[in-house]
Image: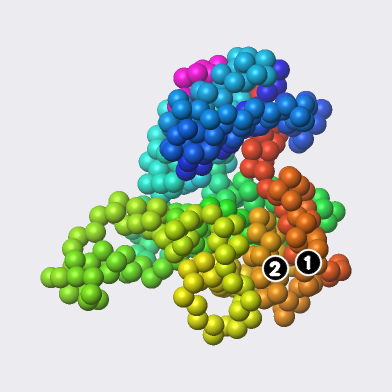
């Protein structure tokens, strides 16, 4: 059987989908079943298992024995055989989402060299690469007959213009250490690009869009003629928009004042400062910042429900409410990047998940020629509309707002199915 297992390791979650490749239609692998495991590091983990062919059959359970990504993957394999009667020996290809690929710009089969290459990049994507590696290791051990293949989020941005990818630092040091803008969420953007192109009946390489990936990690991407020309994330996924626990863009010197031995004073005097290790700075900016630091929750839906959005039209409004502040910060950062990207003439914005955020962005960019949002369409977008496009605008102007439910596992399965070299 031509089965492809697509594995997407998050910071505390694991999403897995099983597809069947068709020789006659490799571009459209068929989804057989899907699974998600959440709260991996806060047991009991929540395990979901659903069958596409049997819409009313699913499994939901709490599992105490899951304590890391490796044990979550092994639990899935057990359920795959017990509940779906699929012998893991029939799985010949495992597609792994890896956030940071460094100089890898296309999928690679995992051998010793490629594994260690990804391992060396873990510090640049601390929320994800380590999780992916633990699953890769488990997959190779449990399914040694299968090809484990890494698909990189950074690969979508491989053609960024040099002036966009380059930081204004000593270029000898930059080149020796690979210090440049890489960009991430590439599998999601590749899926969005194809889906929007199909929706508009256009070739992907003719499409101009601004895409927003808004999850616990959030980013934006300007796509011109089907290519990424700029994106909000950089050397690591830390920069750009704030996320659930990420700070997003900050003044680079902020971290030194944040960790100063004398918090009441801001000074560049080395005698009153203390050494800040890279690991400490990374920990603060990746795990102890973002929406959670502002509001106490990493759930953006909860934030939007509590935020007062009635004052959004007043740019000088000052609020002490943390939820309203977090919402306004997110909106401000999105509009900051949208304004910059619109100078490159993208015609459509794409985003998902938050009715309130879509409404606020739509109202803010209406003055730039985007069609006004149809409130009924916007409010009726459902999480169940997986993999489809919803046009939430009024009319069919050139500048529109679309909602696309992305599917990184399907994108990996599709790329894997189309790569003939993986099936030799």
Residue 73 position in % (x across, y down): 52, 27
Give yes or no for residue 327 being in the magenta stretch: no
Secondary structure at badge 2 equals: helix
Horizontal and vertical percent position of residue 84? 68, 19
Mark 2 surroundings: few (<14), some (14-19) or many (≥20) residues within 10 A: some
Q: Residue at x 50, y 18 (%)?
A: 142
Q: Is residue 349 at all visible to an observer of this figure?
A: yes
Coloration mode:
rainbow
Marking on residue 375: 1
If the image is split into quadrants, where does the N terminus sit?
A: top right
Q: Residue at x 20, y 60 (%)?
A: 275
> SS class of the residue under badge 1?
helix
**Distance of mark 1 from mark 2, alpha carbons?**
8 Å
Q: Which mark is residue 394?
A: none
Split into 4 quadrants, where in the image is the C terminus?
Answer: top right
- Res. 332 image quadrant: bottom right
Give the percent coordinates (x, y) of residue 296.
Answer: 44, 58
Q: Which residue is mark 2?
A: 359
Decide: few, some or many residues near mark 1? Use Cα within 10 Å; few <14, some 14-19, many ≥20.
some
Q: Residue furthest left?
A: 271
- Magenta span contains residue 141: yes
Residue 61: horizontal and vertical position, in percent? 57, 29
Query: Nearest the camera: 268 or 322?
Result: 322
Identity of the residue drawn at 44% across and 64% down = 294
Tell me if residue 318 comes above or below residue 180 in the rendering.
below
Callout 1–callout 2 Cβ contact below 8 Å: yes
Q: Which residues are drawn in magenta?
A: 137-147
Q: Earlier in the sequence, mark 1 or mark 2?
A: 2
């Amino acid at each position: 059987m031509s089965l492809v297992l697509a594995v997407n390791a998050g910071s505390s979650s694991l999403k897995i989908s099983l597809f069947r490749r068709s020789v006659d239609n490799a571009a459209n692998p068929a989804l057989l079943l899907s699974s998600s495991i959440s709260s991996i590091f806060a047991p009991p983990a929540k395990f979901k298992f659903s069958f596409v062919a049997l819409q009313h059959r699913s499994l939901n359970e709490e599992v105490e024995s899951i304590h890391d990504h490796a044990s979550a993957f092994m639990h899935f394999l057990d359920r795959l055989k017990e509940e779906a009667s699929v012998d893991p020996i029939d799985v010949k290809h495992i597609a792994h989402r890896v956030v940071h690929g460094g100089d890898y710009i296309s999928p690679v089969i995992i051998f010793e060299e490629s594994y260690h290459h990804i391992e060396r990049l873990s510090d640049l994507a601390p929320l994800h690469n380590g999780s992916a590696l633990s699953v890769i290791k488990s997959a190779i051990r449990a399914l040694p007959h299968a090809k484990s293949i890494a698909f990189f989020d950074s690969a979508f941005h491989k053609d960024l213009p040099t002036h966009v990818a380059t930081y204004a630092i000593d270029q000898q040091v930059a080149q020796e250490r690979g210090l440049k803008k890489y960009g991430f969420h590439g599998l999601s953007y590749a899926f969005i690009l194809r889906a929007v192109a199909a929706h508009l009946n256009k070739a992907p390489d003719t499409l101009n869009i601004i895409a927003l990936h808004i999850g616990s990690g959030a980013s934006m991407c300007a796509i011109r003629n089907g290519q990424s020309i700029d994106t909000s994330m950089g050397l690591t996924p830390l920069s750009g928009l704030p996320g659930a626990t990420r700070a997003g863009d900050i003044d680079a010197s902020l971290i030194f004042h944040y960790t100063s031995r004398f918090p009441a004073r801001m000074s560049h005097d080395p005698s009153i400062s203390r050494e800040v290790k890279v690991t400490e700075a990374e920990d603060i900016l990746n795990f102890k910042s973002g929406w959670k630091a502002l509001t106490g929750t990493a759930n953006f839906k909860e934030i939007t429900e509590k935020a007062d959005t009635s004052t959004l039209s007043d740019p000088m409004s000052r609020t002490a409410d943390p939820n309203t502040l977090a919402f306004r910060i997110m909106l401000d950062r999105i509009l900051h990047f949208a304004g910059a990207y619109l100078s490159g003439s993208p015609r459509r914005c794409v985003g998902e998940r938050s009715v309130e955020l879509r409404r606020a962005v739509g109202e803010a960019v209406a003055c730039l020629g985007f069609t006004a949002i149809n409130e009924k369409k916007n409010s009726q977008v459902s999480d169940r509309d997986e993999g489809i496009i919803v046009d939430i605008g009024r009319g069919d102007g050139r500048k529109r707002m679309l909602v696309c439910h992305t599917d990184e596992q399907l994108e990996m399965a599709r790329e894997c199915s189309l790569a003939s070299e993986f099936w030799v």
